[in-house]
Amino acid sequence: MRVLLVEPNTALASMETSQLHAVGFMVDHAASGHDAVAMLKLYDYDIAVMELGLPDMEGYDVVRRCRAARITTPVLILSSRGSAQAKVRAFSTGADDYVTRPYDAMELTARMQAVIRRSKGYSEPTLQAGALRLSLDSRDVSVNGRSVHLKGKEYMILELLLLRKGMVLTKDAFLNHLYGGMDEPEMKIIDVFVCKLRKKLQKAGGENLITTVWGQGYMLRDDGVGATAPEMNLSVPAEGELPPHVAARATSRDVRGSVT
């Protein structure tokens, strides 16, 4: 799962990024409210973890702007402000959960996973499609009760497909999810990962779960889901709205051309 961490304190952001990496999250960092809004417009994050005290605006304002722009990414506020008034204000602007510092790392992880699950329509920590099961807690995968051993990137691809079940995901979306714009390989690597993933699922009895939508990408089928599901289509901020480091990443993807 991919997280946007919005935290102006560099040392604190580094520590929290390491904690999230250790439990399997991909993390992008924004140090200001402006950067956070721009990145949330550009990328399809599973969740944003946000400090309230930002240098250019309050975290409340970031959430309000995102909701006004119809950005539905779940937001968990992580702040030292523990008053009831602060929490009520956060929820009223559109935040989904609130954790106060100091916090327990295990509790934060559990809350993040719960918020993400609920946003995707899952009430339990197990994602499923037909006979396929994936546990977000243990990272175990099975088909018809038969365990499927997946490597890191294979697991991340399957997790993304399950979280967006029935939606066509472009190869660029997979690259964003797997690498977060850092040292990305060529797009054809996604075909390699999907091929290996399909073989492992088929060996366990999971036939035809992952569908190729030619010229667009891949989608995970479920009962009643066909290949006409919508493509994941993100709105991109206008030129000049993106912070330089984000604009550079977006431009590098455009140069590589369209997904086939």
Image (cartoon, rainbow, N blue to C red):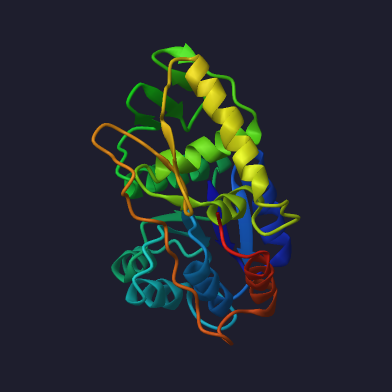
Front-most of residues 126 and 207: 207
Specify whether residue 23 is in view.
no
Front-most of residues 82 and 89: 89
x%, y% of residue 28? 62, 59
Question: Which image quadrant for residue 66?
Answer: bottom left
Q: Is residue 134 above or below residue 254?
A: above
As drawn, the residue found furthest toward the top would be: 146
Specify whether residue 142 is in view.
yes
Front-most of residues 42 and 54: 42
Q: Is residue 31 above or below residue 119?
A: below
Instruction: Quarter of the image for the C terminus: give it.
Output: bottom right
Q: Is residue 85 above or below residue 75?
A: below
x%, y% of residue 193? 62, 36
x%, y% of residue 99? 46, 54
Front-most of residues 126 and 56: 126
Q: What residue appears at the point 73 percent right and 61 percent down from the top-left corner?
A: 11
As drawn, the residue found furthest toward the bottom would be: 240
Q: How many marks?
A: 0
Q: What residue appears at the point 43 percent right and 15 percent down from the top-left corner?
A: 205
Q: Residue 207 vs residue 193: left or right? A: left
Q: What residue appears at the point 68 percent right and 69 percent down from the top-left corner?
A: 255
x%, y% of residue 233? 42, 63
Question: Which image quadrant for residue 153?
Answer: top right
As drawn, the residue found furthest toward the right would be: 183
